[in-house]
Amino acid sequence: FNKGCIVNVRAIDLSVIVVNWNTRDLLAQCLQSVYDTAGDLACEVLVVDNGSTDGSVEMVESRFPQARLFRNAENVGFARANNQALEQIKGRYALLLNSDTIVFPGALFSLVTFADRYPQAGIVGCRLVNPDGSLQRSWARFPTCLTELLGWNPRTRRLIQRMPRVYEVDWLGGACILARSEAVEDVGLLDESFFMYSEEMDWCFRMKRSGWRVCYLDDIRIMHRGGGSANRASLTQLILLYNSKLQFFSKHHGSGSVRFLRTGLVVMNTFGLLRRGLAWHLGVHRSHDMTERLEVQWKLILWLLQKYRHGTIDDTISAAQSARTST
């Protein structure tokens, strides 16, 4: 196994990359936790702001002048924003960190220490917890058409080292991902055609295909607020999510799998629409929230039937906006 055998001459241990879009207060807490827990690591912090209008840029400039700040005029998406920083890092490792995370003491050092001891690891993640301390399931097997349609994908992990508990997994959620610089140079940056969702899954897929391992460390914790949210996704978010899923299958499994998956999604959502519609008609759940959910599901079906095409993200966003405003 020859991965990780390249001599690394980078002077900085860790480059922490945080992409932000209008999360000023959460971003401040995240950055403070990074600086408070970096310890003896030679660490740099890169903040990429995606056109925020809430004072995020000014906050970083005033409170964290030591951070390297990238200002985008608009929201260019998760993958492209991270790539801007990845092309500029000086560290042996890059940590992609969501702005709504809090780093606990020792976490950064433990991630780097493990990666140093396990050169086969291209990507390393850790246990994500909700604000109440409960576990977030941040790893999974690569999806198949059946797991996508059944809504169940076993989060299989294979123990590769007992102390600490280290597992090899297929892919990790993007809230906290440590990537080895040599692995990034080997497989390339994040795929910017994924505007939102599935970009980290695609990255892990390419890492494993190239021979690198994706590892999950169960004894290291980082708090992630986003996973604890129970807010229902908007129509635009759902279309972006479905588009990314279909794009992943098209890229790695071919057009036949996309047709099968899209047909299954239409059937699944139609069944859900009929079930909810019947409950609404019978007066079981006749609320404003249910009416909105019925409208979103109906427009999502229309998009799957009429709007979907494998094109640019601008096509997808335009389709989402059109579906949202259509009658």
Image (spheres, rainbow, N blue to C red):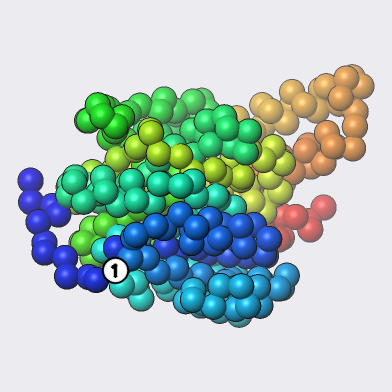
Q: Secondary structure at mark 1?
A: strand
Query: Mark 1 = which residue?
Result: 12
Can you tell which quarter of the image residue 156 is in?
top left
Q: How many marks?
A: 1
Question: In the rendered image, which quarter is residue 256 located in?
Answer: top left
Q: Is residue 146 left or right of residue 209?
A: right
Viewer can see residue 18: yes
Is residue 27 found left or right of 246 in the rendered image?
right
Q: Residue at x 39, y 57 (%)?
A: 39
Give the side of residue 266 with respect to residue 222, left or right: right
Residue at figure coordinates x 41%, y 46% from the top left = 107
Q: Name above or below for residue 290 compared with residue 199.
A: above
Instruction: Tell me: residue 321, above or below residue 135.
Output: below
Q: Nearer the viewer, residue 88 or 151?
A: 88
Q: Position of residue 134 (x, y in %)?
A: 57, 29
Under mark 1, the amino acid is Ile
The residue at the point 22 percent across, 30 percent down is 161
